[in-house]
Image (cartoon, grey):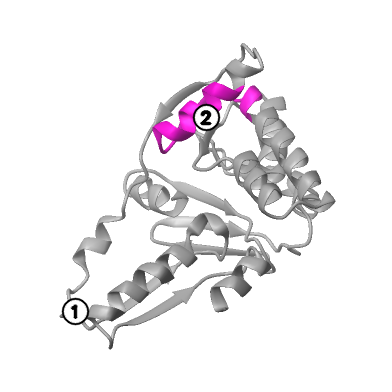
């Protein structure tokens, strides 16, 4: 989502991106499609590990001397960077495409444990702490907007941010790809987690195979939930 937005803006503006991959990676600066992308190494162990690098990332962000600042997501690193910029008189735009507290609640219900209970509490606290501080929030669906409004209304919190619903865009380059004849090969790309619905995809593909026995399905993605990944393999 951020990549597509950056590519579109890069056609008329100078764009600098600051990316923190989920796992590993390395400190690097790359030029891509008119953008400058700063990437930072991540141990992938704890959110605190990512947030520990907040100060140096913020210094790099400030060095860009941008006219507008945009933060994607409601995790601990996003909140830390938001607050650091806010202390310097900068009010970034915040984009939210999914709510962590809902996903962690589903995970807790499916697999009750002290670990999942802590994750639900911690990420909910971080998420709504950030939403309570943000002045301008962009969401990609009415569903996300209604969930945020419902949370604030239920808890009688008056500091509801100004929200705009802007659906995720698609890079026009995808429409310029050659269109080969249907070869019955299907590719699904997405992190192995319950919210991606791989098991439902497999059930649908099994029905397709009744009509097209030679159809083939490839699924690719990082393992975000090991137990769900095991279920997909089974």
Q: Say above or below: 59 vs 143.
A: below
Residue at the disc numbered 2 = 147
* Structural crowding at the residue carrying mark 2, measured as other residues with C-alpha within 10 Å and reported as few (<14), some (14–19) or many (≥20): few
**Magenta span contains residue 57:** no
Secondary element under disc 1, as helix, strand or loop, is: loop
In the visual, does 35 lie left or right of 212?
Answer: right
Q: Find residue 26 and report its horizontal and vertical position in percent.
A: 67, 68
For the point 60% across and 25% down, which residue is it? 134
Q: Residue at (57%, 17%) from the top-left corner?
A: 160
Instruction: Looking at the picture, tell me which residue is in the foreground, 84 or 233.
Output: 233
Task: Write down the residue under mark 1.
Answer: 182
Please identify the dominant SS of the magenta region: helix
Residue 8 in the image, given as x and y percentages of width and height: 34, 48
Q: What is the C-alpha distance between the residues marked 1 and 2?
A: 40 Å
Q: Going 50% across and 33% down the picture, which residue do you hit?
A: 68
Q: Quadrant of residue 131?
A: top right
Can you name the residue that lies furthest to the bottom here? 214
User: From the viewer's perspective, is 72 left or right of 52?
Assistant: left
Q: Position of residue 205 (x, y in %)?
A: 35, 73
Q: Which residues are magenta?
A: 131-151
Residue shown at 66% from the left, 46% from the top: 104
Q: Secondary structure at mark 2?
A: helix
Image quadrant where residue 88 sits? top right
């Amino acid at each position: 989502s951020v990549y597509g937005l950056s590519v579109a803006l890069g056609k008329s503006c100078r764009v600098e991106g600051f990316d923190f991959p989920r796992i590993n990676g390395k400190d690097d600066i790359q030029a891509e499609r008119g953008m400058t992308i700063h990437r930072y190494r991540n141990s992938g162990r704890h959110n605190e590990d990512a947030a520990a690098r907040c100060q140096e990332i913020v210094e790099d962000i400030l060095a860009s001397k941008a006219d507008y600042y945009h933060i994607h997501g409601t995790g601990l690193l996003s909140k830390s960077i938001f607050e650091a910029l806010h202390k310097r008189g900068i009010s970034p735009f915040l984009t939210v495409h999914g709510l962590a507290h809902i996903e962690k609640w589903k995970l807790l219900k499916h697999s009750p444990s002290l670990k999942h209970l802590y994750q639900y509490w911690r990420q909910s606290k971080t998420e709504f702490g950030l939403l309570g501080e943000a002045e301008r929030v962009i969401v990609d669906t009415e569903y996300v907007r209604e969930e945020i409004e419902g949370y604030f209304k239920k808890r009688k919190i008056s500091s509801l941010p100004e929200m705009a619903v802007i659906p995720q865009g698609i890079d026009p380059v995808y429409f310029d790809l050659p269109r080969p004849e249907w070869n019955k090969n299907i590719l699904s790309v997405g992190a192995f987690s319950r919210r991606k619905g791989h098991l439902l995809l497999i059930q649908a593909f099994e029905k397709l195979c009744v009509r097209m026995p030679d159809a083939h399905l490839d699924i690719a993605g990082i393992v975000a939930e090991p137990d769900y990944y095991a279920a997909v393999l089974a």
